[in-house]
Amino acid sequence: MGFWRNRTIRGQLYQAVALLLVVGCILILADNTLENMRVRGIQSGFGFLQQPAGFDISESLFGYDSTQPYWKAFLTGVGNTLKVALLGIVLTTLLGVLLGVGRFSHNILVRSLCLAYVETFRNVPLLLQLLMWYLVCVQLLPDVVDAEPFLGFYLSKAGLALPVPVWGQGLHWDVPVKAGFGIDGGVTLSPEFLALLLGLTLYTASYVAEIVRSGIASVPRGQREAALALGLSRSQSMRLVQLPQALRVIIPPMTNQYLNLTKNSSLAVAVGYPDLVSVANTSINQTGRAVECIAVIMAVYLALSLLTSAFMGWYNRRVAIRER
Amino acid sequence: MSNHPLPRWLAGFALCAAALSSLPAHAGKTLDAVKSRGQLVCGVNVALAGFSSADSNGAWSGLDVDYCKALAAAILGDANKVKWAPLNAQQRFTALQSGEIDILSRNTTWTLTRDASLGANFVGVMYYDGQGFMVPKKLKLTSAKQLDNATVCVQSGTTTEKNLTDFARVNNLKIKPLVFEKNEAATGAYHSGRCQAYTTDASGLAAERAISKNPDEDMILPEIISKEPLSPLVRRGDDEFFAIAKWVRNALVEAEEYGITQANVDEMKSNADPNIQRILGVSEDMGGLLGLDKEWAYRAIKAVGNYGEIFERNVGKGSPLKLERGLNSLWNKGGILYAEPIR
């Protein structure tokens, strides 16, 4: 048994056995689940995705209505998740970088405000923050009927309605106007969306700020001193010397925060935003296909996470310092 | 490559073994399980005034709760031998399927989809309900058909979302549903003015008004847009327990039909009516056929009263909900409440 003494081969053998065991476990679990469901008369399968959904979704990026099949309803949910996640990631990054850099400000007021922000938002549970922002949106804002336009904008319990440019015969503006219980025209951001976006952004930005701060702090002090000695201003030194070097420390943990933000957006249902989880919840109840719907949720979040990781990995390799 | 791959290897194996050993959940006799446990596990609503709610001492009450108490009294001889499992709308079916609870008594609408695909059986209607709308009085609405362009708050995981969509389509209305996971969140958004209407079963609307701070600010629109027969459920594949659940429900209804009440159930034992004698187990042993004893129905009635008493105490005149009997009156008193005969 010579090959047994070969460490590499032995290691590979262990790995193969482990892999077989894992795959076997998964197969047995899946088979057992299906068998148990069959025995209990629980119907299963993804065929229901072709059936008409029959329920409405309050906001949709691409005109969904209740006569369309379940998979379109799911797609609408994914679209809503992506909408809040992408916008959230952009805003979080901007705010987080500002706050992180602010921690190095020479102005004590700016410095302490940034610190206070981070400590406050990082230490209050996200769900509470979401509920708070939602309450602020729907309690304090005026009813739609009482809303007054401001430069074509309406801010009311129905959300923020804003005019959008439309390219028809020449450029003109689609301006929102009051209609019955709601507002017609323009683009309306619902209070549910605003509360979720605000909550996710403010919460995650506090983490991003800490990452940015630690990244900048990791750049040797000499770099900054050298930059200043060369005659660069403090902001130039930050922008041109310190931040670029800090990036390679900042990027990897940032990926985590982006993933967190995307996954945390599943709290949407608490404030009535129709994200993927909300749509799946409704579907589970209409069809009874709990296992299938949960599988869809898991697959979508997994795909989103892997895509984000892949993108950030690519970006990280681009900004990494090349050893020459 | 690690120098000691074996322990990790073993750990993985142990994990798999653990996962597999706990596998085939026993789908057998619910009655035996309840008896040997000495307790009935009953899934109820987390909080729905009149149907199931817990007071500050943790004592549960309500129409759905009383049904489980009756069932426990019939099987175990003690209405208090119930373990309550408060469930939200999405958890309820999974809890029943997985065997976590013996019976689901949680204002659940009996529909074809649920009956055919959940692996559960509906026991019998405990309450005939229908979906309605609540709106603020200040909107001065008189009909649900005026809700065009309105935003309506609903709770997720119920039949309400689909009914609402159907109603909007039939009447050519644009209605935006705003879906919340928790009922309190849905009603909260409604009361804050985010939605122009709140929709759920009419009994739920009455319950919401009963606990509202300013019940006079809201009104319930006349339209009832759906049929919502609410029934308890048991797991499929256990006909014995299914039958027990069905006949306890029937016993409560028949008791009202024959005038047997919580107060007079003892005197009624000496009543000459053979129907009453059968129900109370004075003459024939009906319980034996179900796998119970002679006095199963006697104990159920003694514990919670007949259907009429349960109704009045929890949702009717004697309660803050003050719902009319309406459809839920007995079949011979203008309603559609009917029970197959115990004989």
Image (cartoon, coloured by chain):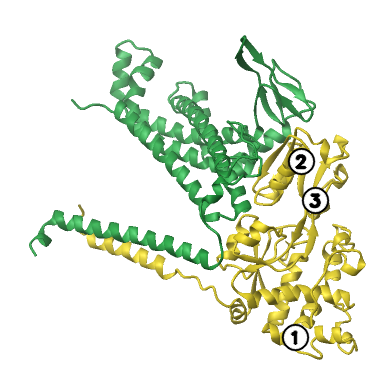
Q: Are marks 1 and 2 in contact (CB under 8 Å)?
A: no
Give the mark nearer the N terminus: 1 vs 3. 3
- Residue to which mark 2 is pinned: B170
The image quadrant that residue B58 belongs to is bottom right
Q: Secondary structure at mark 1?
A: helix
Labels 2, 3: front one: 2
Which amino acid, by three-letter code, is at mark 1?
Answer: Met
Q: Position of residue A92 (x, y in %)?
A: 49, 30
Q: Is residue B23 visible?
A: yes
Q: Residues within 10 Å of mark 1 (few under 14, many from 20)?
A: many
Report the chain holding disc 1. Answer: B
Of B25 and B78, which appears nearest the observer? B25
Q: Residues within 10 Å of mark 2 (few under 14, many from 20)?
A: few
Q: Secondary structure at mark 2?
A: helix
Between the residue at mark 1 and the residue at mark 2, the CA separation in whole angstroms equals 49 Å
Q: Which chain is yellow?
A: B
- Residue to which mark 3 is pinned: B205
